Image (spheres, rainbow, N blue to C red):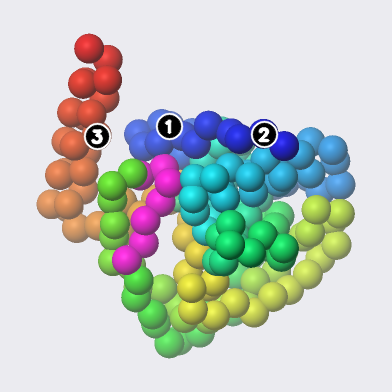
Amino acid sequence: MAILHVLTFPNPVLRETCVEAVPGTDEIRKLADDMLETMYIAPGIGLAAPQVGVSVRMIVVNIMGASDDSDPHILLNPEILQADEEITAFEEGCLSLPELKVHIERPRMVKVRFQDLGGAHREMLAEDLLAIAIQHEMDHLEGRLILDYATSIRKDQYRRKVKKLLAERSI
Ligand code: NI
């Protein structure tokens, strides 16, 4: 396994719409392993393939983080089949947008269809933090980031902050 470099905003790869993941290959299995290791080390509870520079539709989620790595969710080509009307709100962060937290409202429960690493079609029902994490990671597959949910004032503030950080780093 290897720890991958996590891309940060405004890297353009984070804005791409990802292509279908092809299950059953050694490459996709290795990518899933590496993404999990990268997520646990970060530490985070979810990671999408485009965040490590691979624009394919695969996400990994484990709301227990590294404290229990026995049963992570690895979802290829996830689709939301059903979303609950009940809404939940959470201060979301993202490894690709350091130092940003955005209050986001999402359905509290979602039914998701996906393929596993071997290509089998599966469905799962996710609630609360797991539902939030899955929806957050699925946003990445469309090039959507938590910044997009922020008010325009906060968007400007964050863009300015990132610009300043990048300028400092290049000196
Ligand atoms: Ni994210």
Give the camera-side residue of 93 and 121.
Answer: 93
For label 3, the residue is 162
**Image quarter hosting the C terminus:** top left
Determine whether, in the image, residue 69 is placed left or right of residue 29: left
Tell me the amino acid under the disc marked 1: Pro
Which residue type does callout 3 highlight? Val
Question: Which amino acid type corresponds to the residue marked 2 in the rendered image?
Answer: Ala
Image position, residue 135 (x, y; %): 51, 65
Closest to the observer: 130 or 142? Answer: 130
Residue 27 coordinates in the image, percent (x, y): 79, 36
Residue 141 in sight here: no
- Above or below — where is 93 with respect to 3? below
For disc 3, the neighbor class at 10 Å (few under 14, some 14 to 19, many from 20) is: some
Q: CA distance from mark 1 to mark 3?
A: 14 Å
Give the mark nearer the N terminus: 3 vs 2.
2
Q: Which residue is mark 2?
A: 2
Q: Is residue 122 magenta?
A: no
The residue to which callout 1 is attached is 12
